[in-house]
Image (cartoon, coloured by chain):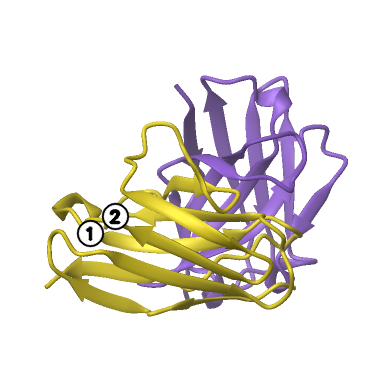
Chain colours: A purple, B yellow
């Protein structure tokens, strides 16, 4: 069974940084693309970033380009999202998600329960 | 970036009714279109991938169709457990954008 457990969320001041982590288990982490998807309170889903199985292809939504960095550690079966220069608009529940294939052009087949990030002074 | 729109934004229907949601992409995405169900307080769940393929374990009352820019999602006979928000998503090119969602509840 696919398990994705996010951590690292919390309250942070505008302009500060935060690093989210996602521990993956129940599947061969090395073989699949991974994603971060966020959901602001009471709003819809927003795809934030994706990384291919080899980490040779990454992509971001325009609103986070230059501020967020996605990465993965195969030895630790973990996905990360380094978030810099945070703004209140980044306040959301951040989901870690698993793709259906190695490339980032895939279906999201598994989701974690999310970690909440609040950006406020 | 590819923009996704959905209609309606919300609907109320009776148990047993057929429910239909439409999704439109701002450019041709072939059949790279998926549908997710999200119940309150829960993570989303994949229902249909590549327009019309049911994910394992998903009831056959759910279906999808379309290609190019126009897509349709249907529930043939609405059940109480189908109360949720439904999102379409394209995986043709990043960012893999979601539609704004359609909230379905019981009349």
Local crowd size for mark 2, using a 10 Å CA cut-off: few (<14), some (14–19), many (≥20): some
For residue B20, the mark is: none
Where residue A40 sits in the image (x, y, percent)? 45, 68
Asked if residue A11 can be seen in this view, the reply is: no
Q: Quadrant of residue A98?
A: top right
Tell me the chain of label 1.
Answer: B
Q: Residue A105 placed where, x, y %?
A: 74, 48
Point 68% across, 78% down: residue: B26
Q: At x 28% / y 54%, what residue is drawn?
A: B41
Q: Earlier in the sequence, mark 1 or mark 2?
A: 2
Q: Does the CB distance between marks 1 and 2 fall below 8 Å?
A: yes
Chain letter behind tag 2:
B
Question: Which part of the image, by quadrant, shows the N terminus of chain A?
Answer: top left
Q: Nearer the viewer, residue B49 or B17?
A: B17
Tag 2 secondary structure: loop
| Residue reaching furthest to the right | A56
Residue B78 in view of the camera: yes
Report the residue marked by disc 2.
Answer: B39
Name the mark on residue B83: 1
Does A74 sit left or right of B103 as displayed? right
Query: Quarter of the image holding residue A89?
Result: bottom right
Left or right, residue B25 beside residue B36: right
User: Observer-nearest residue: A17 or B66?
Assistant: B66
The answer to whether residue B90 is left or right of residue A65 is: left
Around disc 1, counting alpha carbons within 10 Å, would you say few (fewer than 14), some (14 to 19), or many (20 or more)? some
């Amino acid at each position: 069974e696919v398990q994705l457990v996010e951590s690292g969320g919390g309250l942070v001041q505008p302009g500060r940084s935060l690093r989210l982590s996602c521990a993956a288990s129940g599947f061969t982490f090395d073989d699949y693309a991974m994603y971060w998807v966020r959901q602001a309170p009471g709003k819809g889903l927003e795809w934030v970033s994706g990384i291919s199985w080899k980490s040779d292809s990454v992509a971001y939504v325009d609103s986070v380009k230059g501020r967020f960095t996605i990465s993965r550690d195969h030895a630790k079966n973990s996905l990360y999202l380094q978030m810099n220069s945070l703004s209140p608009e980044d306040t959301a529940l951040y989901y870690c998600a698993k793709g259906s294939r190695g490339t980032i052009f895939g279906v999201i087949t598994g989701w974690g329960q999310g970690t909440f990030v609040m950006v406020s002074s | 970036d590819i923009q996704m729109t959905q209609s309606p934004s919300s609907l109320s229907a009776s148990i047993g009714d057929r429910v239909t949601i439409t999704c439109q992409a701002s450019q041709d995405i072939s059949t790279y279109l998926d549908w997710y169900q999200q119940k309150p307080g829960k993570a989303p769940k994949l229902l249909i991938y590549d327009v019309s393929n049911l994910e394992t374990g998903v009831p056959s009352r759910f279906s999808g169709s379309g290609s190019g820019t126009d897509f349709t999602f249907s529930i043939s006979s609405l059940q109480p457990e189908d109360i949720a928000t439904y999102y379409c998503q394209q995986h043709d090119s990043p960012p893999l954008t979601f539609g704004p969602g359609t909230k379905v509840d019981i009349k």
